[in-house]
Each structure stands twice: as C-alpha cells, then as structure tokens.
Image: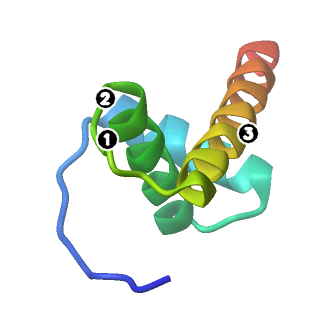
Amino acid sequence: MATRKVTLSLDTAAIEFAERAAKAHGISLSSWLSKAARREAVRTGYGPHLAPAAEEQAATDEAEAAAAERELRAEG
C-alpha cells in the first residue's frame, strides 16, 4: 500500500491511547493510526465506492480496535 508522510497534531490523551494500542497489537503507531483513520472514515459513511476488499479490511480493523479497547479498559 502506498504511503504519504504527513504532520499531525493530536491531543496528549489520544496519542497515548494510540501508542498503547499499537504496542498491544505489535504494530507501528503509523500503521495503527492509518487503520484507525480508515475505520472512522468508513464508519462515518465516507467511501461509498469502496471495493469489497477495503470493506473487509475495515471490518477486520474494527474487530482489532474493539479488542484493543477491551484490553485498555482491563488495564485501567
């Protein structure tokens, strides 16, 4: 998949949660944020022309996010 380097500003809590979730899943922060952005775009209705593979990937990402959230909540 092609990538593009960008600069973002995120609130402290959001970046800390993202870092913990990425670490828990054994992936880079960039990869985790990319998946999270894709999931949110699909969830909010963006991408009406998504290919079936993209929809399947978004569903997989959503399941991973739910698991990460459960783990974070369990940690307190």
Colour mode? rainbow
* Amino acid, disc 1: Pro
How many other residues sit within 10 Å of disc 1, few (<14), some (14-19) or many (≥20)? few
On screen, 43 above or below 38? above
Label 1 sits on residue: 48
Which SS class for mark 3? helix
| CB under 8 Å between discs 2 and 1 | yes
Q: Quadrant of residue 3?
A: bottom left
- Residue 16, image x and y in percent? 48, 40
Numbered label attached to residue 64? 3
How many other residues sit within 10 Å of disc 2, few (<14), some (14-19) or many (≥20)? few
Q: Residue at x 39, y 30 (%)?
A: 13
> As rendered, which of 26 and 12 lies closer to the eye?
26
Which SS class for mark 2? loop
Numbered label attached to residue 45? 2
Which SS class for mark 1? loop
| CB under 8 Å between discs 1 and 3 | no
* Amino acid, disc 3: Glu
- The numbered mark, 3 or 2, whose residue comes first in the sequence reads 2
Residue 32 relative to residue 68: left or right: left
